[in-house]
Image (spheres, rainbow, N blue to C red):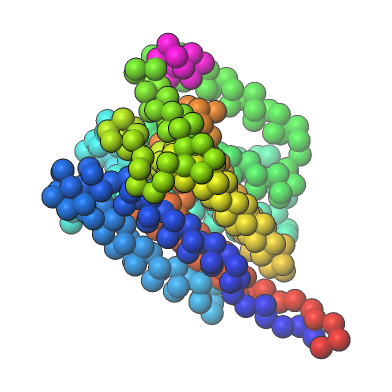
Amino acid sequence: MVKNVGLDKLLIMTVVFLMLFGLIMIYNSTMILAKEKYADSFYFFKKQILWIAVGLVVFSLISLLKNPVYLNQKFIFLILVVSIMALFMVFFSGKINNTYRWIRFAGFSIQPSEFAKISVILYLSYLFGKKKYDVNNLKKLIVLLIPIFIIELLIFKEPDYGNFFLILLVTMILLFVAGLKFRYFFVAFILISVLTFISLKLSPERMNRIKAYLNPQEYALTYNFQTMQSIYALGSGGIFGQGLGKSTQKLYFLPYAYTDFIYSIIGEEVGLIGALLILGLFFVFLIRGLLIAKQSGNLQTYLLGIGLTFLIISQALLNISVTLGILPNKGIPLPFVSIGGSSLMASLIIAGIIINISKHRKMVFLND
């Protein structure tokens, strides 16, 4: 007998636990800064609570959709156009931290690149989900990928190298799953390598960051300051950590400890055990996401589930790799855990779509 499987409760629990863990660590890593700057040790905590409340409403609405509008062609193209327009608008909103990444209004800042990643995956899964479409028709493929090229160009111009790399990576994953031949990946790799080399040569700032990555100790007080402090934090945590609220690196030694480097504070306060717990939760997210995609019974939802799952996992691994000094700093937050409204909202939208795909799964039960 064929039955609906229903919402994936384990994935929902995983997302909720990551957010709760993130709330605890956000308060621990910001209470002193918030007290000194805003005379309220709960300032950042309350802001994150607000974003979680709004995000959970959006998450619930998407999760319970009876008609998955995210598969509709008109909706997908609308979202894609809005994403491109929003990425243009950031250049008229002024710089924050020497980059054009945010649109500011009514006291809030929205980072369009966080949502552009979702629009890219919606678009690609729609394109490759059509069985009549031949992904190895290279001329047609290049034309259809023009919106992705535009998005990548705008994000690179901001600059936001972390999200630029994430979109590139997930695009390659979906092209691979859709059946693109290996020789095209080889050509793309050569082309990307050449463009990367040219980009580095034309920018002393980017070249210095690469030099800093290759020679961490030499640039320990400049480009590598955050990374070195992050490694100190993780190393000082040991197996069981120094205890909740007892981090020393959050005392202005590690800048932005509550955003891109919150994993470092986790490692310092709750040790290797806590750090592995977070990795374990993302591993659960990966397994459940891929299983939901496999059981979706539709090529478009299959590609969409894979793309969204790998987007979350790739972002988590990129963030953690930066905190460990494996990769240069890319400004990528830890999904569901780091403070930040745009990142949290985008992550909950992604989780909501995957959960909704799980809601519409149908499985055959024997001997029912």
Which residue is at the far bottom? 368
> Which residue is at 43% across, 28% downward?
232
Q: Residue 15 at what x, y percent from top left?
A: 50, 61
Q: Residue 184 at what x, y percent from top left?
A: 71, 34
Mark count = 0
Q: For the N terminus, give its image quadrant.
A: bottom right
Viewer-proximal residue among 112 and 42 = 42
- Above or below 162: residue 306: below
- Above or below 176: residue 349: below
Residue 125 seen in this snapshot: no
Does residue 244 show up magenta in the picture?
A: no
Which residue is at the far top? 218
Residue 195 seen in this snapshot: yes
> Which residue is at 62% across, 57% downward?
284
Q: Residue 229 at what x, y percent from top left?
A: 39, 28
Q: Residue 108 at what x, y percent from top left?
A: 23, 53
> Residue 169 is drawn in which quadrant?
top right
> Residue 6 is drawn in which quadrant?
bottom right
Q: For the C terminus, give its image quadrant.
A: bottom right
- Above or below 112: residue 348: below
> Residue 357 is drawn in which quadrant?
bottom right
Viewer-proximal residue among 73 and 9 = 9
Q: Viewed as shown, does residue 76 lie left or right of 260?
A: right
Which residue is at the far left? 39
> Which residue is at 60% across, 67% downward?
10
Q: Viewed as shown, does residue 59 lie left or right of 366?
A: left
> Which residue is at 58% across, 27% downward?
192
Chain part drawn in magenta = 208-219
Viewer-proximal residue among 99 and 300 = 99
